[in-house]
Amino acid sequence: MKLSLASMSAIAASAMLFTLPATSAQAANYYNCANATGCKLVNQQRATSNHTATQYPVVMAHGLGGWTRLFGVVDYWYGIPQTLMQGGTEVYATKTSAVHDSEYRGEQLLQQVRTISAISGKPKVNLFGHSHGGHDIRYVAAIAPELVASVTAVSSPGQGSKMADWVVKMVTEGSAKDGYAPGEFNLGSQAALGFFHFVGGFMDAGSGVPLNQLQEQDGWKAVVALTTDYTKGFNKKFPAAMPTKYCGMPADTKVNGIPYYSFSGVGQVTNGLDPSDYMLALTSLSFGDEPNDGLVSKCSSRLGYVIRDDYKMNHLDSVNQAFGLTAWLQPDPKSIYRTQVNRLRTAGL
């Protein structure tokens, strides 16, 4: 059977149409980097678009008491890696000591970023840090700017948390009242710090860290690292894209060629079905009338280009926890990340 030139052209055009999805949207990967030997592939799926297909991979750093993928089931960044993968993003969830000092965790994250760069073959990464993880990513960007394409802090206490101030005050004053010397803790505080240590080890093991290689935990250093006094010193060492005063707006949004971003929310009980909301309603009392998300104030969360600091979401909503029970009729946290990563893609990052 002979085909006309027009028929052959139509067939060729149809074949091209059928192959377009495969060539324009490639497979995207999601890795758990809690393993001593590197990163373990958690999931791979074909992207349905290139909406979030950044040049450099997205690296996510958890907050205090955090994990990566707990017992292979629950992501710390609940549903967010999967959403980004649909748009073509390569995602790495990192694991530092769940409970420790900012610079200690920052150095751990730096080593993981070097590993991720080697695995991905990309010279840089786009860093996202939630809560205490926002300190960690700032540390990496300051120490090794050549490895960082962008920094995005999520509900991070850049100028400390009044809740941490309150905890430190209760521990030190309570211990002094019981006759303990400065730097020593009464039995109640020792028990609480011991529980912090247990939680840190549990999150390590649950994330996939081998039992004989569990990371060091230090509950006291972790709490102190989130206080306003500690962050004053931290910010002097790592001032990039920070406001010069509390409740001020950052003057610089790009430092050492790295664009800095932040977003956060206000409110505590955003979904009545989420039991963690009521805990955050209690912790928010330490902030008085100051707008906060239960653990971090609106003013303390600002870094670089402030996308928004008044989303209707509490501290856990900002990572789509618990289990996606976030505010009704408000922006979906997953869509906020999707928009931000698209912003990075548009910027060539």
Image: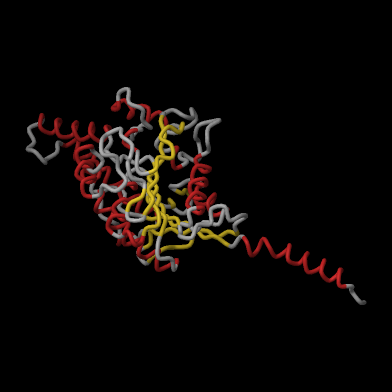
Using the image, determine if residue 123 lies above or below residue 132: below
Judge by depth and name the residue closer to the eye, 290 or 247.
247
Which quarter of the picture shows residue 315?
top left
Judge by depth and name the residue closer to the eye, 212 or 241.
241
Residue 6: x and y in percent read 86, 69
Q: Residue at 57% across / 62% down in the picture?
A: 27
Q: Residue at 38% across / 62% down in the picture?
A: 35
Residue at the top extreme?
289
- The quadrant the N terminus occupies is bottom right
Indicate how the structure is coloured in the image: secondary structure
Using the image, determine if residue 59 lies above or below residue 312: below
Residue at the front extreme?
251
Residue 307: x and y in percent read 43, 40
Q: How many marks?
A: 0
Left or right of 19 on screen, residue 230: left
Using the image, determine if residue 36 lies above or below residue 271: below
Residue 30: x and y in percent read 49, 58
Left or right of 286 on screen, residue 208: right
Residue 145: x and y in percent read 32, 59
Left or right of 227 on screen, residue 76: right
Residue at the right extreme?
1
Q: Residue at 64% across / 65% down in the picture?
A: 23
Judge by depth and name the residue closer to the eye, 39 or 184.
39
